[in-house]
Amino acid sequence: MPSPLSTKRFLFYLILGWIVLVIAQVLIFNRLFTFPLKITITDSLISITMLLLASLLVLNITKYYLPTSYQYAGIIASSLVLSLLWLLITNSFLKIIFDSQVAYLGFLHNSLVIRFTFAFLLLTIVTTASILWYNWQERQKESQRKSDVEALSREAELFKLRQQLQPHFLFNSLNSINALIGLDPQQARKMVQQLSDFLRGTLKKEESQMVTLEEEISYLNLYLEIEKVRFGNRLQTRIDIREGCKLALLPTLLLQPIVENAIKFGLYDTTGQTLITISCHLDQHELVIIVSNPYDPETSVPKKGTGFGLSSIKRRLYLLFARNDLLITNAKDTIFETIVKIPQ
Amino acid sequence: MAKVIIIDDEFLARSMVKEYLKKHPQLEIMAECSDGFEGLKAIQEHEPDLIFLDIQMPKISGFEMLELVENPPAVIFATAFDEYAIKAFEAHAIDYLLKPFDQERFDKAITKFMAQNRPAATESTKALLNDAQLPGSNSRIVVKNGSKIKIIPVQEVLYLEAADDFVKIFTKEGYYLKNKTMSFFESFLPADMFVRSHRSFIVNIQEITRIDPYEKDGHVAILKNGAKINVSRNGYGKLKGVLGL
């Protein structure tokens, strides 16, 4: 931990304080008590310099020994001891130096209580300030560490949420390719290519990276092509992008899991053809994406709020935008809608 | 000659099985189905010896379809990824193929099927279906009403009553029979909604209007529609806990 002495400003104040006190003492002794300048300067230099040394001692002690809570008794006791020590030393020095100045020695003797009180007050202030400073430092470091940990875990969580590639999708796609190798090798090769491009896309992107809607849609198309090979005619899709939102930004790999969810929900909740629509438009400062799929209200009971596997997307949006209202779902008649808003 | 039916919602997955079956002329493909409804119809029509069955399918899962078959044949499940189902398959010695699979693995499954007799196959299929660990949506119960399949959301179930080898599932419209055990339903149904109040009864707690003392140390629960449900001493304790009395 850096000591307050390592900050230039603190050091400056300490020296300034020392100079001010020396000058003040000289002026007071010289003008009020009319002692010669030589005596007052010597007295001031010795007293105040010793006081400065005591302060430095306090600063260094508190660096290694920081009272856990505000132990006032401890602070006062240590200041008392230090002040007494200071008094003893300065008094001895001055007595030795001015052993022939009887008037001054008398004055020195009379002013002991005042000197002691002054040193005690000053050292108490220095000790308290030093403790406060170190405590503040400690807290600063603590909160820094805390926010570091938070940022780290947020990154990790985003990574995990994004990585939730459905193993079902992967293995079923491989199974389709396996079948195509016998039936239509050309198509099999094409699907291997598409699957590779799709997987590469999931690998290279950063968690919090923003991409344009155009990029995200082209990535989504890759995914839809693969699903259409798997499900054939059963899966129909329609993508409708309004003018002006192609360059709108959204978190990478956000759309695909939402569409995947809609496809799963739509295909497994109805027999026959399933139409999935994806429409995007700008509403003031938000990009609004609506994904719809058919469902059967009699047999599936949409949970309130999200549900249907959308909670991880909701969580991701919360981590990125600190808002909980960016993903809503809406069930009407036989159409289930997932609506995502991305602040621009 | 053994009769085979393939049930999978993906065309390519079915054609994969068909291709591998070419090496086994002793097996005849009677039907190919793309969902559980078609599957059930084909099973009733052809009475196959073996079914290749996908788990995740439109509307009703492979398990839910199989539950509606009275005398299930041998089943080889084909699934992409389902760790809980796989645990259940292994617990009941049911064969399964993990997609994608190759001819060699497929041939092994066929060899195993040929070595097994029909009653044993039926028994292990039934045991699998009664395993409460079997993954499935616990928000609904699939039943057969004549030749029609009905999906009952669990909140529409009033109560269940044991009836020999079956369980009667009571709804507002009447009851449906299902070839399952009470203990299966006890662990299958959401525990915050249904309580096994008695050896022979499971009750939807939202339907209870009051609980009266009955005979020596029993109770009886009166439902909104007037039905009376037996409550044992143990069941009374459980009801009190759930209802917060």
Image (cartoon, coloured by chain):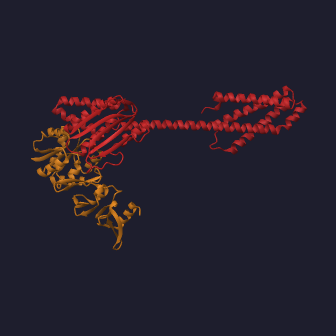
Chain colours: A red, B orange
Name the one closer to the observer, A334 or A219: A334
Name the one closer to the observer, A99 or A305: A305
Picture quadrant of residue B105: top left
Estimate the x, y position of residue A153 in percent, counting from the top left.
44, 38
Picture quadrant of residue A193: top left
Estimate the x, y position of residue B33 in percent, counting from the top left.
16, 44
B153 lies left or right of A151 = left
Estimate the x, y position of residue A222 in percent, counting from the top left.
27, 31
Q: Does B50 sit above or below residue A151?
A: below
Q: Does B235 sit above or below residue A30?
A: below
A41 lies left or right of B95 = right
Picture quadrant of residue B79: top left
Please tell me which residue is depicted at 15% across the width and 53% down the height of the picture: B118
Q: Quadrant of the C terminus of chain B?
A: bottom left
Furthest toward the front, the residue is: A284
Name the one closer to the observer, A258 or B6: A258
Please tell me which residue is depicted at 81% across the width and 29% down the height of the picture: A26
